[in-house]
Amino acid sequence: MIDLYAKKMIAHKISKHNITQLTKATAKVAYELRKPTETLLFHSKQGSNYTSTEFRKHLKSINITQSFSNPGMPYNNSVMESVFGSFKREALYYYRFKTEKNFFEGSMRIWHSTITNDRILFL
């Protein structure tokens, strides 16, 4: 998750499965890290993990207002679409990881370099 006001990554998690619990856990980490005192706006695309009743109740319970991209309009969520596009090009489609552990460790390094605009070198 990215704080667009502060222009920085505040939470991220990687899993083999994109499920509501992963999204909820990431939102929880971000919330606990930032400890906001005002209502926040959470903007996302309309994926099932974001529109699930469980996730929507979780956001409401921590005083976060949810906002969605319009169907078929990725421009509303262009910051995250750009970040994920760079991450996929630089990690998922470029490197071949031998084990799941290598994937998680390597993708975290690539993810960090993507969001900080650093360049990394795998040896």
Image (tube, helix red, strand yellow):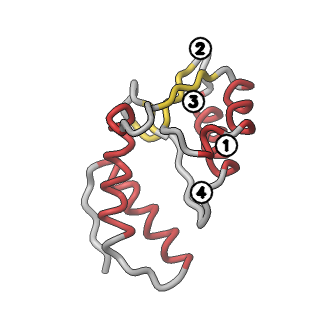
Secondary structure of the residue carrying tag 3 is helix
Horizontal relation, residue 37 to residue 97: left or right: right
Read off the residue under disc 4.
Answer: 18
Marks 4/1: CA distance?
11 Å
Give 19 or 25, whichever is nearer the viewer.
Answer: 19
Identity of the amino acid at label 3?
Answer: Arg
Residue 33 picture location, percent across and down: 60, 35
Q: Report the residue at 43% width, 31% height from top.
A: 70
Tag nearer the camera, 3 or 1: 1
Secondary structure of the residue carrying tag 1 is helix
Asked whether the beta carbons under mark 4 and mark 1 sit within 8 Å of each other, the answer is: no
- Precedes in sequence: disc 3 or disc 4: 4
Read off the residue under disc 1.
Answer: 24
Identity of the amino acid at label 1?
Answer: Lys
Q: Quadrant of residue 18?
A: bottom right
Asked whether the beta carbons under mark 4 and mark 2 sit within 8 Å of each other, the answer is: no
Q: Report the residue at 43% width, 70% height from top.
A: 106
Marks 4/2: CA distance?
29 Å
Residue 108 picture location, percent across and down: 46, 61
